[in-house]
Image (cartoon, helix red, strand yellow):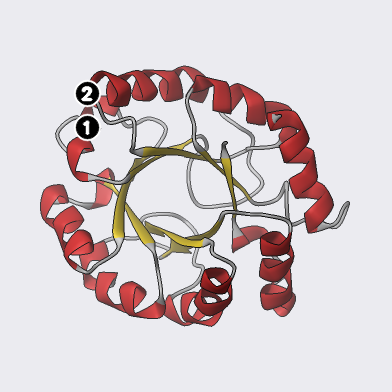
Amino acid sequence: MVKLAPSILSADFSRLGEQVQQALDAGAEYIHVDVMDGHFVPNLTIGPPVVAAIAPQVRAAGAVVDVHLMIEKPERLIPAFVEAGADILTVHVETCPHLHRTIQQIKESGVRAGVTLNPATPLVSLEEILSEVDLVLVMSVNPGFGGQSYISASTARIARLRAMLDGRGLGHVELEVDGGIKPNNAALVAKAGATILVAGSAIFNRQKSVAEAIAAFRRELG
């Protein structure tokens, strides 16, 4: 079954714990945390204290604290996010000149390691690291802000990456997709090969409850 990872980037931070619990109660398997530094991406978000605040309730529900580091020099903050309670740390190929070393640092810290790349970065940049990671994240928008529209070319890109993973006997590596994911394109993205869908504004919005939004995804995914 395709797993859902509500992104707290779109949550109401005055009610963060409540909204995270609503997502967990509705069956979300992951809680996605977008960390931005205002340098690599044009936005500034949250740090380890927020991860530490929500990690106990996420783990109590049997879900995964999924932290996406959209930051320069991520190796400097890996220990802090591990201590805060991250279960997965995902870094960008664009910010890691010594990517293998950074992935090993994450794994040696006792958490799962993910790697991601921006929409215009060639998939070939992942070839030498795929066997070392637990998760690959495909960005289907340019990172930095929530509420963007899905880049349609991402579907073929997801399918190519799924073929790369399966062709190397790496079907166990999770394929996560983040950006513009909504109920009306969730099934298409899953069919292309995604195993985890990140959704922010489609889940945390004022038009419907978190539970109703997650139920809409489940209906489309079947």
**Helix, strand or loop at disc 2?**
loop
211 and 123: which is toward the camera = 211
Q: Could you tell which of marks 1 and 2 lies nearer the N-terminus?
A: 1
Q: Is residue 152 visible?
A: no
158 relative to 53 in the view: left or right: left
Locate residue 70 relative to residue 197 in the image: left or right. Answer: left
Q: Which quadrant holds residue 113?
A: bottom left
Q: Position of residue 52 (x, y in %)?
A: 47, 80
Q: Nearer the viewer, residue 64 or 49?
A: 64
Tell me the residue at 66%/59% (across/down): 10
Residue drawn at the location 74% of the way across and 48% of the way down: 214
For residue 104, side relative to residue 220 (left or right): left
Which tag is nearer the camera, tag 1 or tag 2? 2
The N terminus lies in which quarter of the figure? top right
Question: Considering the image in quadrants, where does the C terminus appear?
Answer: top right
Mark number displayed over residue 125: 1
Residue 193 percent location from the top left of the image: 47, 25
Q: Residues within 10 Å of mark 1 (few under 14, many from 20)?
A: few
Separation of residues labelled 1 and 2 (CA atoms): 16 Å
Q: Identify the amino acid type marked 2.
A: Arg
Question: As displayed, is residue 159 above or below residue 24?
Answer: above
Q: Position of residue 204 (x, y in %)?
A: 74, 57
Seen at 22% across and 23% down, the residue is 168
Residue underneath mark 2: 168
